[in-house]
Amino acid sequence: MFEKALYAIAIAALLVSYKKDRVKTKKALKKAWKSFVNIFPAFAGVLSLIGLTLTILSPDIISRFIGNNTGFIGMFITSVIGAITLIPGFIAFPLASSLLEKGAGIVQIAVFISTLMMVGIVTAPLEIQYFGRKETLLRNSLSYIFSFVVAAVIGVILS
């Protein structure tokens, strides 16, 4: 029901915009379409990645390796995966949600998302070119450690 209301509001706003200035509205719709076409492959990748992950990894496997009972070992596993993986947020968050539904622990997923967003092993060579080796290693090391702090805080708040 809520989605229908949002669609109705969006359509009404589009009609008002079209009445006010047809040229700008058409231009905006063309830009929106181009943005959609550009983002669609990544969005399709989100659906494919989530589907593939959940097909390959059963809830038992997820719980065994990154479930609530895995403690620091599960956090370490997800932190390493997060640190070396280059996934944009709009893919990572739905994947994290699906993993939580299948038995992953909140703290383990929190450290995964934190390292994914803050630590950049794959992008480190480029970062070294711009900021230097010392700064890159320091930033990544501190971000990695801070990811565990963030996960611990989230674990305390949500449990």
Image: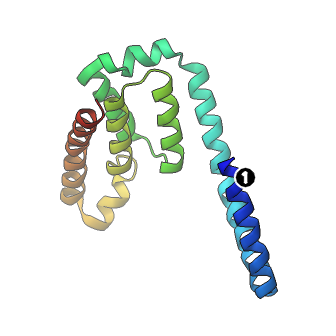
* Residue positioned 58% across, 20% down in the render: 56
* Residue positioned 81% across, 84% down in the render: 19
Q: Residues within 10 Å of mark 1 (few under 14, many from 20)?
A: few
Q: Nearer the viewer, residue 133 or 149?
A: 149
Q: Is residue 153 visible?
A: yes
SS class of the residue under badge 1?
Answer: helix
Q: In x, y percent, where is residue 149? A: 20, 41
Residue kind at label 1, given as amino acid type:
Lys
Q: In x, y percent, where is residue 105? A: 36, 25
Residue 114 in the image: above or below residue 32 = above
* Residue positioned 35% across, 41% down in the render: 83
Q: Is residue 88 visible?
A: no
Residue 3 in the image: above or below residue 64 = below
Identify residue for label 1. 4
The image quadrant that residue 136 belongs to is: bottom left
Residue 156 in the image: above or below residue 5 = above
The image quadrant that residue 156 belongs to is: top left
Q: In x, y percent, where is residue 69? A: 30, 16
Report the quarter where the C terminus lies. top left
